[in-house]
Image: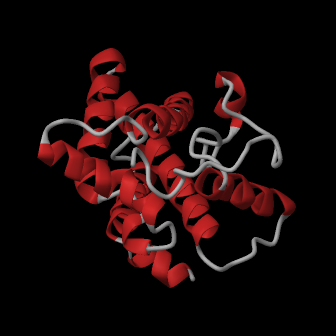
C-alpha cells in the first residue's frame, strides 16, 4: 500500500522537496520560520477546498485543450474514482502552482519565508494525497478519524458532488455551507458524470 503511494510521481517529487529542505535546514543552509510553515499549510488547505469546489467542478470550458485539462484534473476521476492514475495531482499541475505560491510568499515576506511556506505547502499536500489515496483504495483506516475522513470523501463521489469538497480537511465545508451529515443529501444522478 505504502509502496504504491510512494511510487507516484507527484508524491515522490514532494518527498524529495521536503527532504531537501529539511537537510538544508539541518546543515544550516536554510533557516526555516515555523509561522510561515503553518501559513503555507493553511494556504494549501484553503486552496484544496477552493480549487476542488470552484475550479475542478467548474462547467466545461469552450476551449478543447482546457476541457481536456478539466477531464484529467477532475472530471475523469469522478467517472472512475478508483483509478490510481487519475487520483493524484499531476506533476505538471503541482509544480507550477507551488512555484507561483512560493513566488507570492517571496514577494510578500522574503525568500526565507517562501522556503518555509513551501515546506508547509508540500507537507499539507502530502497529507492531502495520503488521505485521498486511502479514501479510494480497498483499505479500512485503523482510527475512527481515518474511517470518518474516508467515508466523508466517498460521499462526494457516491452521494452528491455538490457537497463534501474537503478531502483532507473538511472544516471549510462547514464554513462555506457544503457540509452535510451522511443522510442529509439525496443521491445525485451526476456524481459519476459531471456536467453530462
Image x and y of residue 31, in percent: 42, 38
Image x and y of residue 28, in percent: 39, 47
Image x and y of residue 11, in percent: 41, 65
Q: Is residue 91 above or below residue 99?
A: below
Image x and y of residue 50, in percent: 48, 31
In the displayed structure, does residue 75 sit left or right of residue 187? left
Q: Nearer the viewer, residue 34 or 166?
A: 166
Q: Residue at x 40, y 44 (%)?
A: 195
Looking at the rendering, in which quadrant would you find the N terminus?
A: bottom right
In the displayed structure, does residue 135 sit left or right of residue 118? right
Question: Is the image coloured rainbow, by chain, by secondary structure, or in one colour?
Answer: secondary structure
Q: How many marks?
A: 0
Q: Residue at x 45, y 75 (%)?
A: 6
Q: Is residue 31 visible?
A: no
Where on the picture, by quarter, is residue 164? top right
Where on the picture, by quarter, is residue 14? bottom left
Q: Is residue 181 visible?
A: yes
Q: Residue furthest top?
A: 108
In the displayed structure, does residue 157 sit left or right of residue 5? right
Q: Nearer the viewer, residue 169 or 160?
A: 160
Q: Residue at x 69, y 78 (%)?
A: 139
Q: Is residue 147 above or below residue 181?
A: below
Q: Nearer the viewer, residue 38 or 22?
A: 38
Q: Is residue 127 above or below residue 142?
A: above
Q: Residue at x 50, y 66 (%)?
A: 81
Amino acid at each position: 500500500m505504502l509502496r504504491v503511494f510512494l511510487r507516484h510521481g507527484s508524491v515522490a517529487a514532494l518527498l524529495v522537496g521536503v527532504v531537501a529542505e529539511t537537510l538544508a535546514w539541518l546543515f544550516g543552509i536554510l533557516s526555516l520560520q515555523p509561522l510561515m510553515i503553518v501559513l503555507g499549510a493553511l494556504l494549501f488547505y484553503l486552496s484544496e477546498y477552493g480549487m476542488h469546489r470552484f475550479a475542478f467542478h467548474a462547467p466545461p470550458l469552450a476551449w478543447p485543450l482546457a476541457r481536456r485539462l478539466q477531464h484529467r484534473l477532475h472530471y475523469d476521476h469522478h467517472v472512475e474514482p478508483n483509478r490510481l492514475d487519475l487520483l493524484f495531482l499531476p506533476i505538471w499541475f503541482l509544480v507550477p502552482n507551488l512555484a507561483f505560491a512560493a513566488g507570492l510568499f517571496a514577494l510578500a515576506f522574503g525568500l526565507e519565508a517562501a522556503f518555509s511556506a513551501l515546506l508547509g505547502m508540500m507537507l499539507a499536500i502530502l497529507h492531502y494525497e495520503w488521505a485521498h489515496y486511502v479514501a479510494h483504495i480497498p483499505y479500512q483506516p485503523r482510527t475512527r478519524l481515518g474511517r470518518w475522513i474516508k467515508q466523508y470523501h466517498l460521499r462526494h463521489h457516491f452521494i452528491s458532488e455538490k457537497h463534501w469538497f474537503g478531502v483532507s480537511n473538511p472544516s471549510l465545508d462547514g464554513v462555506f455551507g457544503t457540509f452535510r451529515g451522511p443522510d442529509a443529501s439525496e443521491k445525485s444522478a451526476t456524481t459519476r458524470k459531471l456536467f453530462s
